[in-house]
Amino acid sequence: MRKILVPIKRVIDYAQKIRVDSSKGPQGVQLKNVKMSMNPFCEIAVEEAIQLKEKNKGAEVVAISVGPKQCTETIRTALAMGADRGIHIETKPDVRGDYVDLQPWAIASLLKGVVEKEDAVDLVLLGKQSIDSDCGQTGPLLAGLLNAPQATFAANIERGDDGSFTVERETDTESVLISLSNNKSAPSFTWQNSTTTLGTETIKLNACGKPAVITCDLRLNTPRYPTMPNIMKAKKKPVNTISLEDMVKELGLDLDEVLTPQNEVVEVYEPPPRKEGETVGSIDELLGKLKEKGLVA
Amino acid sequence: MRLSLARRFHSKLGAPAAATRAAIASSNYSTLPSHNRGTTTPAQHHSSNLSSLLSSRKYTTYSQLPSEHQMVYEMCRKFAEEELMPNAGKWDQKHEFPTDAVDKLAELGLMGINCSSDHNGSELDALSYAIAMEEISRGCASVGVIMSAHNSLYLYPIDAFGSDDLKERYITPYTGHERDENGRLNIGCFGLSEPGNGSDAGAASTTAKDDGDEWIINGTKAWITNAHEASAAIVFATTDKSLKHKGISAFVVPMNAPGFSLGAKEDKLGIRASSTSNLIMENVRIPKSNLIGQPGEGFKIAMQTLDGGRIGVAGQALGIASASIDCAVKYALERNAFGKPIAQLQSIQNKISQMTVARDSARLLTWRAAQMKDNGEKYTREAAMAKLAASEAATMCAHQAIQILGGMGYVTEMPAERYYRDARITEIYEGTSEVQHLVIAGDVLKEYKQLY
């Protein structure tokens, strides 16, 4: 196994209460003095990458982030968890200061360029979605752009000796054990009916010369605490910082196209405050009310 | 003009007094010791060397900390919130040593935090240690004392004064990454206090007799933290009674040596998850090479060790204070009285403010002492001030937290009562508050005397 690329995103910390900031326009969220940290699903992706690196000696884990200069701290956390080096595509404070500006299409285009530039990338591990925009698009878009095999919502990843990845995915329905093969000459997917397992499905991504793209879900692993010695070592690991403009030029992309949002956020609003409940006198009354609201047949 | 004024006014008091007053009146304020001590800013440094400017920079707030210290803070805080806080009450109630949590602490590198990587240590500085101690103790004060006794009191003296051979035998296996034959972590303890002397450390009655290629240790040590989990102890014993405190030496004693036994576990008011008992040594034989440093150096080793230990204890006290403040403020925001949350009442606000000021000022003193230690400056006074301020802040904050919680603060359902019990010891061990006053005043007086 050679390189594992892990794109990570710096977002508002999951434990923070989000406040809508209408002064920033219809889609503003208050970001001043708000604690930021690594997206939890990205942490899971970093942890998985390090576990795979520990099982496959010689693999290199590269963490990459797109954002303002504080993203280097997020990258350092990934390094302290065990990643080997970092790439920081630095945006000016007004871009990616607010997540709506750079969207999945732009990120996926940049990542495609990085994957091709890095060469020898066997696997790209991403979080299934970020907790600020919740788009969940970057992974699938990247796989599409690279014409690479992908599996999303991974709950378990096993690497075969032939370089293939068998991924158990979270699904909402009863599932079937499937074997998919992405054959270079004839991209076809063969489905085999075997055992049924509730809520998951298993896919095998065959080694085909392209990196496998896998997005990680909650049950995949529990991210480790960075140990003290690793925090010290993280200081010495290299982080390559390059401005967004320079990277776009290097990859031969169009800066305007990258910066233009594909989606427009129309409005951001807080959910309505929880209304007071009603006290009812008896079980019959309760059933009556539930039927009235159409919650019970 | 100032000089003559002083002389006229005080001439009745006699020559020496007048001369002193005159001297003070005439002196330029900036040469008075207190203005120079520990307060040099980069602006006062006339060095144009960037690295020396950077090395003298003082961090006073979390946002100023370099990224590695911030990572230490984040990691310890997260660990404390997830692994320690939910279990601390149970461990306290059962007087249960938190073996799993301490194992995890060791895996994270917190049981060898200042040791060099040559001995599998984490090579972090004193400021990181102070930050780590505060966050861990905020989760569980007992885990805090287990960690501080092991790091500052056991590992430090061997690291600072021991031979390379001693370090190989007693530091490398003890930095948290090795296990003994029973799969347990190697933990150390520090034996200075005796039933007959605590603050009076120079009056050690434990003896060490020279017997060819061994020392024979006889005596009892009291109030030893980690006694029941440790496998090695730093023991201070008299090698030459005639030299009084200059006749005390420091030794590393393996606790499985024949003649070594433990007293019963003390039933304490607080930090109940950590074990405290006597160490009883009856003709315990240790190799000559187990002497730390030189014979007669023991008292100096003990004092220097306690200086660093005070930063750790200050960190622990800050953690208890912070936990008390968190508990009290959260409660005040939710509890309603007289039609609104009690946080809106002035009495409560006064308490919250007093608690925060006490905790924050103690934290600044602690960070100052830690940074002076890291810069290689003499920090005895500053460490004593930090420990004094932080321990008094802890007892005050815990006391007021119970007051803010009212009846709720008195019952075990809320952690306030445990913080109150845990805080109390910080004013006693590693030098009582009274001893800290003496250390501080002694140092201040010495400095003024040198000028006059």
Image (cartoon, coloured by chain):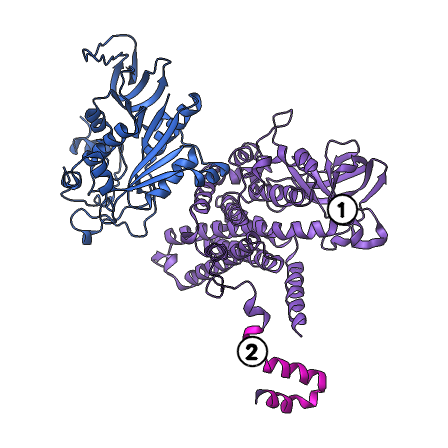
Chain colours: A blue, B purple
| Tag 2: amino acid | Asn
Q: Which residue is mark 1?
A: B294
Above/below status of B96 relative to B298: above
Residue B245, image quadrant? bottom right
Q: Position of residue B417 (x, y in %)?
A: 53, 49
Q: Which residues are magenta?
A: B3-31
Could you tell me which quadrant the N terminus of chain B lies in? bottom right
Q: Which mark is residue A25?
A: none
Badge 1 element: loop
Considering the numbered disc 2 on the image, is that residue within a helix, a strand or a loop? loop
Q: Give the image location of residue B325, x and y in percent.
A: 46, 53
Residue placed most toward the observer, A54 or B274: A54
Residue occupying the far bottom of the picture: B8
Q: Is residue A87 visible?
A: yes
Q: Is residue A135 visible?
A: no
* CB contact under 8 Å: marks 2 and 1: no
Residue A213 location, quadrant: top left
Q: Residue at x 18, y 11 (%)?
A: A186
Chain name for mark 2? B
Residue B81 placement, left or right of B446: left
Distance between the alpha carbons at the discs numbered 2 and 1: 44 Å
User: Residue B320: horizontal and vertical position, in percent?
Assistant: 52, 50
Relative to B39, is B222 on the left or the right?
right
Mark earlier in primary sequence (2, 1):
2
In the picture, the quarter occupied by the C terminus of chain B is bottom right
Q: Which residue is mark 2?
A: B28
Residue B284, horizontal then vertical, whole percent: 80, 35
Tag 1: residue type?
A: Gln
Q: Nearer the viewer, residue B110 or A284?
A: B110
Horizontal side, residue A85 vs residue B251: left or right:
left
Q: Looking at the picture, does residue A218 appear above or below residue B146? A: above
